[in-house]
Amino acid sequence: MKKRVVSIVAMCAMMLSLAVAGAQAEPVKLTMWTLFSGGEGSIMTDLISKFNAEHPDIVIEEQLIEWAQYYNKLLAGLISGESPDIGIMHLAVLPDYASRDVLSPIGALLEAGFADKFLPNIIAQAQYDGKLYAIPIDTHPMVMYYNKKVLKDAGIPEDKYIPKTWDELMANARTVKEKTGKWGLTLETGAMLGERWWIALYHQLGATFLDPATGKLTLDTEKAAKAYEMIATYYKDGLAINSGDYNECEALFINGDNAYHFNGVWAMSVYPTTEGLDFGVASLPAIDGSKPFTWGDSHSLIFPKKGDDAKLKAALTFGQWFSAHTMEWAKAGHLPVNGDVLKSEAFLSLPMRKDYIGVGENAVLAPSVKGWTQLRTEMWEIGQRVVAGELEPKAAADELKAKIEEVSAQ
């Protein structure tokens, strides 16, 4: 009888031990919302699968949200408590979320020296009110693509294909129009023109959006008007097509119907494999050979406040792992913001990356203030009215300043 009791006790102890071991082996399950489709989406899914395979104690379940609906759903989820454990966020809109106290500050939870690996202008943008809220995974600035065949047909010498100044670009665009009848320049006239091209010129003219004395949004209306005037000339002179259709503008470039095309570096996931397209890529021109500032933004990983330390720790494990594996993500055309990856031979060996590797350091990101999400949509609309001839450059600058003052007062 005594032996039987001992056996039962031993069996119970073994079962309890197995139960505890099983509980310990249960992986931490995380949800991650993404907004990437096409080539970007495939790469992101592959990276998540690779992480899951290497980390049996963590399981990340990806949920793809349509880009157009992503931020509306994310905001609703953050407010209602139904947010993911990990999300994607453009750094341009980070202040509008961090200011609501719905994101986890992560600076003190990362490995020592982790933040020091990033490009200074990018990691600075991942902060709000002195705290780090995001792990940047790329920067995707606007660059200049050029169609070599169109330029050759226009009689432009090969060593002049890449204009260093805006005057040189204008001259080449005129030559293309006169010699071939094709467009000198194309870019979508909403976000790509009203926000991105205009911001590049505004900063190249020496202006900024933040008052150095107060840290508040401001606008140099004289330089803002000058930037609008430079843009409007291409449309008044018939050198650029006035189209708000991104796909139409891209098709004109791919099909050889225009010479220069402004687009993001993400197009490098498509153009190198496009049959019959002989093209190059370079930084935007600069005013009088000055620094070639360009618009830029950055995808980042954010971590909504959930009140679960174990999940946050697991989510940050993924974030730091992803940062070290952005070489794969860079195949989508984006520039790495992790300095170790950016300087690696593996990255530099990708097609044409050496031609625009320095663009990230000259990328102007949105100021870290609330209201930019609203303000940039105003920029899109104002830019479209300028190129349509409905709004003079000075009036456009005055209207934008009024919008900035309105947003700042909210």
Image (cartoon, rainbow, N blue to C red):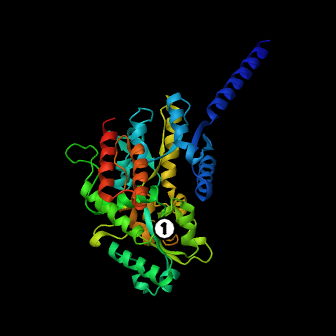
- Say few, some or many: other residues with alpha carbon within 10 Å of mark 1 (under 14 / 14 to 19 / 20 or more): many
Please state if 271 lies on the left or on the right of 187 as rendered.
Answer: right
Give coordinates of residue 61: x percent, y percent: 63, 42
Give coordinates of residue 50: x percent, y percent: 61, 52
Give coordinates of residue 399: x percent, y percent: 32, 49
Nearest the viewer among 46 and 230 is 230
Residue lying at the far front in this picture: please name it. 390
Nearest the viewer among 364 and 163 is 163
Please state if 205 lies on the left or on the right of 247 as rendered.
Answer: left
- Residue at x-position 29% and y-position 62%: 226
Tell me the quarter of the image containing the N terminus. top right
- Residue at x-position 45% and y-position 82%: 178
Picture quarter containing residue 143?
bottom left
Dot 1: element: loop
Q: Is residue 338 above or below residue 161?
A: above
Q: Mark 1 = which residue?
A: 241
Q: In this view, does 160 lie above or below 73?
A: below
Nearest the viewer among 370 and 175 is 175
Please state if 237 lies on the left or on the right of 21 as rendered.
Answer: left
Give coordinates of residue 95: x percent, y percent: 39, 41
The amino acid at mark 1 is Ile
Q: How many labels does the image show?
A: 1
